[in-house]
Amino acid sequence: MIMMIKNPDKKIILEDGQEYAGFSFGSGSEKILEFVFNTSMVGYQEILSDPSYTDQAVVMTYPLIGNYGMAEDDYESLTPTIGALIVREYNDEPSNFRSADTLGDVMKKYDITGVYGIDTRKLNRSIRDHGSRLGIITDISTSKEEGLRKIAEYIVPKDAVSRVSCKKTYVAAPLFDERFNVVAIDCGMKQNIVRSLVNRGCRVTVVPFDTSYDYIMAQNPDGIFISNGPGDPESVPETISVIRKLIGKLPVFGICLGHQIISLACGAKTYKLKFGHRGGNHPVKNLETGKVEITSQNHSYAVDIDSIKDTGLTVTHVNLLDGTVEGVKSDKDNVFSVQYHPESAPGPQDSAYLFDKFIGLMERNKKNA
């Protein structure tokens, strides 16, 4: 167990003036980030390596973090881009035979700032009550006035997707029984999505977020997938424009940011949630079957339910906590999407049918071609 040093060496200053003193682990870099919380009890490695957390400081509600280390096979991206991790209690002596590194060592490697020893209950309650907002992680000696000045001068970046998307096309394919060719548009895609498609017999051609319609169609795909990713969905107009052209041509499936991009491409609108949805226990009702799925979620934006009218889309899933849209579809155009992450398996298999649905659409489309 890590030994607390005598005095706190790090400070969090939120844009509303709240201050929290704690202890440093991982990288010690000063950063200005959006502070959000995640209610998952496990899965900190997947959270740390999820590109959707780019430019964010994630406050964990579960108090003990780091106790099972970091396993080589559990990363969602090869280069984590999360801004910071804030925890109550950090453990740097993991007990797990699969552990290859400590959480703190990995955070140092990728310049991810860590703070432990603060009252995370108070900070998380503040985010829930007042919304996610900017804050600075800085040295304990920094005054509140200096921290607030830096936050006020900070310009929030709008290029998160371009930073986390792949830079060139790559292919992941099954060893046997290759049945479908899927083009996956990478907006910050989690690797378990690729594995979920490959395990179902898909050759997955992963392309950058700004890939042209002509290039995508030149790959002769059976279906199109749009991935999760960070930031405001309206900040990727090039992706929205390409999806608008692709809808109706081939089966299209989107997850998280991909869900929002599909909705925008069809004429719906999106808006930013007060504090977002981040955790592994969100109940979502499937309106078509009446069943409730326990889902994994990580997003700041949602699709405006009132804007879906006249888009050709229908709502298929709703969040039982706040009534927000969790899924849409258009049977005519063979397109569907969900706001949550079926590949994360918190249920554990409540939502796996969505990948099978995508396979079924491609199979029928090929037969009818």
Image (cartoon, rainbow, N blue to C red):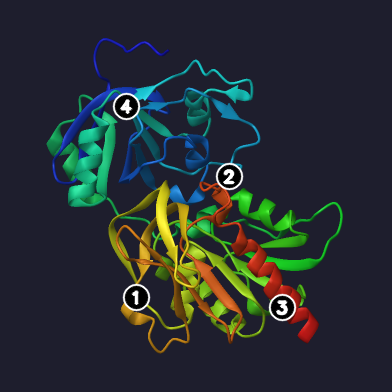
Q: Secondary structure at mark 3?
A: helix
The answer to whether 7 is drawn above or below residue 202 in the figure is above
- Circle 1 packing at 10 Å, graded few (<14), some (14-19), many (20+), is some
Pointers 2 and 3 in contact (C-beta within 8 Å): no
Q: Earlier in the sequence, mark 2 or mark 3?
A: 2
Query: 107 or 318, which lies in front?
Result: 318
Say which amino acid is labelled 3: Met
**How far apart are the two marked residues, 1 and 3, measured between alpha carbons?**
31 Å
**How far apart are the two marked residues, 2 and 3, measured between alpha carbons?**
27 Å
Residue 177, position as x, y percentages in the image: 86, 59
Q: Quadrant of residue 366?
A: bottom right
Pointers 1 and 3 in contact (C-beta within 8 Å): no
Circle on res. 217: 3
Q: Secondary structure at mark 2?
A: loop
Residue 338, position as x, y percentages in the image: 49, 65
Which label sits in the foreground, 2 or 1?
1
Circle on res. 305: 1
Q: Earlier in the sequence, mark 1 or mark 4?
A: 4
**How far apart are the two marked residues, 2 and 1, measured between alpha carbons?**
30 Å
Say which amino acid is labelled 4: Arg
Residue 299, position as x, y percentages in the image: 40, 56
Say which amino acid is labelled 2: Glu
Q: Earlier in the sequence, mark 2 or mark 1?
A: 2
Circle on res. 121: none
* Residue under label 4: 88
Circle on res. 76: 2
The answer to whether 39 is drawn above or below residue 293 in the figure is above
